[in-house]
Image (cartoon, rainbow, N blue to C red):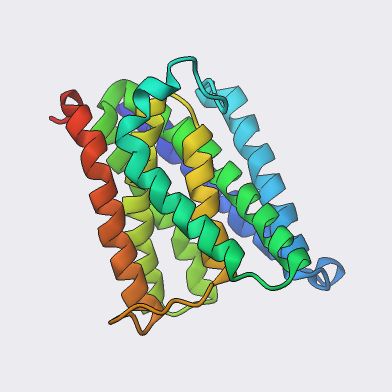
Amino acid sequence: MRRQIKLISALWGCMLGSMLLIGLIFQFPLLSHLSSSLTTGLEEMIFIAIALILNRDWLQQPLTYSLTATWRQRLHPLEPTLIVTGLMGGYTLMTAHRLNTTLTILFIAILISLFEETFFRGMLFQASRQTLGVIKAAIFSSLLFSLTHLINLSHQALSLTLLQLVFTFVFGLLLCLITAQTASLFWPLIIHATNDFFSLMQPPINLPGIHSTASFQIVEVVIVVLLMVPILRQNRAWLP
């Protein structure tokens, strides 16, 4: 067990180092003139390639992006999550103004979610699940997913980054549970891409008591925690 956890931690460290190095490379004068959208898109594609190479050479986890034949039987506890996801995506599209910008951001959101779901849920969660079980593996891989966002300290305040760490941890837990529930990365990809699309587009939020990004993120954390409840209820065997 310890050997597997050490391997997973080492691969996470390798990926984190690669992300930092690639970020620095794109600061070189030859590449620094590229638009932020193009830079992010190229970085994410490189991250996906690195993740796939690490999986091929080390973890060798099967990556399932399609729905299995029994996915409808497993959909019931996910219905609240899918409703919230649909509302977020629909509202983001309805408040969008420029088609080109919207499509660009949507494509970037898909690339980001493809990398993060492949690496954190498809590889790290599935590999650690074999030795730790669903809940402990979800906590472990979600902690790594959360800590990865410390990279954002380079361009945002500490207080906002700490809130982001909390949100990404609980969001990672939800996505791990959905991966275990459906035996596929399909719905985690859709949900993750929609969340990132919403975050990148930053549609106007007019809710009572919500006056800042921080307060909205706290509400998001509460919602995500509540969305985990029906999944855990149907899968009590996962609990210690």
In this view, the residue farthest toward the top is: 69
Q: Nearer the viewer, residue 207 or 105?
A: 207
Side (left or right) of 119 relative to 39: left
Side (left or right) of 208 relative to 168: left
Residue 165's x, y, as percent?
36, 62
The mark tally for this picture is 0
Side (left or right) of 57 relative to 237: right
Q: Nearer the viewer, residue 77 or 36?
A: 77
Q: Quadrant of residue 77?
A: top left
In this view, the residue farthest toward the bottom is: 211
Residue 240 visible in the snapshot: yes
Give the position of the N terminus as an image quadrant: top left
Q: Is residue 95 above or below residue 93?
A: below
Q: Nearer the viewer, residue 119 or 105?
A: 105
Residue 141 visible in the snapshot: no
In this view, the residue farthest toward the right is: 30
Residue located 79% across and 71% down the image: 32
Give the position of the C terminus as an image quadrant: top left
Residue located 48% across and 46% down the image: 191
Q: Nearer the viewer, residue 182 or 145?
A: 182
Q: Is residue 112 above or below residue 91?
A: above
Residue 142's x, y, as percent?
36, 46
Residue located 28% across and 42% down the image: 139
Residue 235's x, y, as percent?
21, 27
Residue 50's x, y, as percent?
65, 39
